[in-house]
Amino acid sequence: MNILQNAFKSILLRSPIMRPTDNLIERMNKSLTNSDIGTILRSQFSALNLQERTMASLNNMHKTGPHWKPRIKKRPLDGHPLMKGVVLKTLIKKPKKPNSANRKCVLVRLSNGKEMVAYIPGIGHNLQEHNIVLCRVGRVQDCPGVKLKCVRGKFDLGHVIKQVK
């Protein structure tokens, strides 16, 4: 009987969800019958049955309708269409797999305090550290993590210069 009690004690101590109380260990130390040990274990692990989620019946699913997860809103500028920012660093990003190029980007500290990477559209730019740019929402499809674009012709970022032939 002692071997059986020690085995149940070791199972209870290894249980990740329910830890045995001192009262339970005292009851286990007394001489118990097999039926008593079974009732103690059932009372100890009754919380395990509550944590399992049961499948909904067809009738229940018909009443509640389909379950949709709420979509995570992707709002890099917190709902603002444009935001001013200060250039911290100029970057050159490589696009994803089928494309190959060097995308000109800048790391910008926006006026809301966030630091984000913004793409500079067009050929050539004059941006350096501490320049001020206007950023709009618009991601670059082949560059991961680039969710903003700089507006040409505003603040320190000039217009695209026409190429002379």
Image: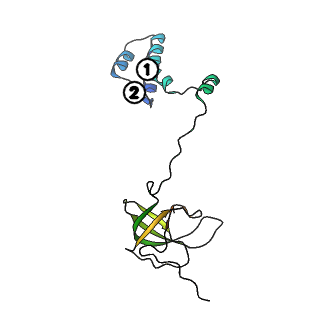
Q: Which of the 4 quarters of the picture holds residue 56? A: top right
Q: On the image, numbered disc 2 is attached to which residue? A: 19
Q: Is residue 25 left or right of residue 59?
A: left
Q: Looking at the image, which residue is at 33% across and 22% down?
A: 22
Give coordinates of residue 18: x percent, y percent. Answer: 42, 27
- CA distance for labels 1 and 2: 9 Å
Give coordinates of residue 62: x percent, y percent. Answer: 63, 26
Question: Mark 2 falls on what kind of element?
Answer: loop
Give the residue type that dot 1 points to.
Answer: Gln
Q: Looking at the image, which residue is at 59% across and 62% down?
A: 141
**Observer able to see residue 82:** yes
Q: On the image, numbered disc 1 is attached to which residue? A: 44
Give coordinates of residue 6: x percent, y percent. Answer: 43, 22
State how many labels appear: 2
Front residue (pair 63, 146): 63
Q: Which of the 4 quarters of the picture holds residue 20? A: top left
Q: In the image, is residue 98 above or below residue 67? A: below
Q: How is the image coloured?
A: rainbow
